[in-house]
Amino acid sequence: SDLHALAVTPDNATAHMVLGIGLHTEGQYARALAEYRAAAALDPSGRNIYYNMGLLFQARQKWQDAADQYETIFRLTPGNDPKFAAILYGAHFGLAEVLPHLGRTREAAAHLRDALRIYPDTVESLNNLAWVLASSNDPEIRNGTEAVRLAKRACELTKHQVTLFLGTLAAAYAEAGRFEEAVATAQKACALAAKSKDQ
């Protein structure tokens, strides 16, 4: 067990991190954070440790603390080393979710673009960037044409079966001035939502 591993090798950063994940999953945030910090003290370059701390702070709505953890991953990984693609993607996606709470929506959009450069067909990143481009309060961020392209791709990859993604596509069509398609897509989203409630 993880506790056995800690008892046998108390200086094992991985054991601390795994125990932290277990505690985090159980909602024991303070104890989880203590384990993550112990892991980071033992392995200051452990990107997964900072990622998990970022998720923990994000779950607690401690936006700046979460951003600091994700940004640490970039400091540890100069030059986008492909060997760290998954953790870099996670950090970009995490920052994209956290930064709008800090009033940094433009940076959030940039991190979604970076996430899509790593994994171009991740539906969550396609959808989230499309939503930002279709609905941002900042006119310099909004781009209906690009939003439509991204939202269409997310819908294609999910065979038009995800209500949320259809809603984003409808918003993208509206931002692009394609109102008939916006209405038709919104109606499809409503029908899909009603169908899924019946099942």
Image (cartoon, rainbow, N blue to C red):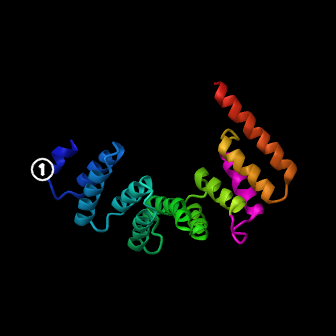
Identify the residue under disc 1: 8
Q: Quadrant of the N terminus?
A: top left
Q: Is residue 62 left or right of residue 189?
A: left
Q: In this view, does 12 lie to the left or right of 50?
A: left
User: Which residue shows up at 61% across the image and 50% down it?
Assistant: 123
Between 92 and 120, the residue placed more toward the observer is: 92
User: Which residue shows up at 66% across the image and 45% down it?
Assistant: 164
Query: In which quadrant of the rendered view does residue 52 lie?
Result: bottom left
Dominant SS type (magenta): helix
Helix, strand or loop at mark 1: helix
* Residue stretch in magenta: 137-157
Q: In which quarter of the image is the C terminus?
A: top right
Where is residue 27? Give x, y as percent.
Answer: 35, 45
Where is residue 127? Give x, y as percent.
Answer: 64, 53
Q: In the rendered image of this protein, does residue 194 appear above or below residue 16?
A: above
Between 133 and 57, the residue placed more toward the observer is: 57
So how many labels did they put on this image?
1
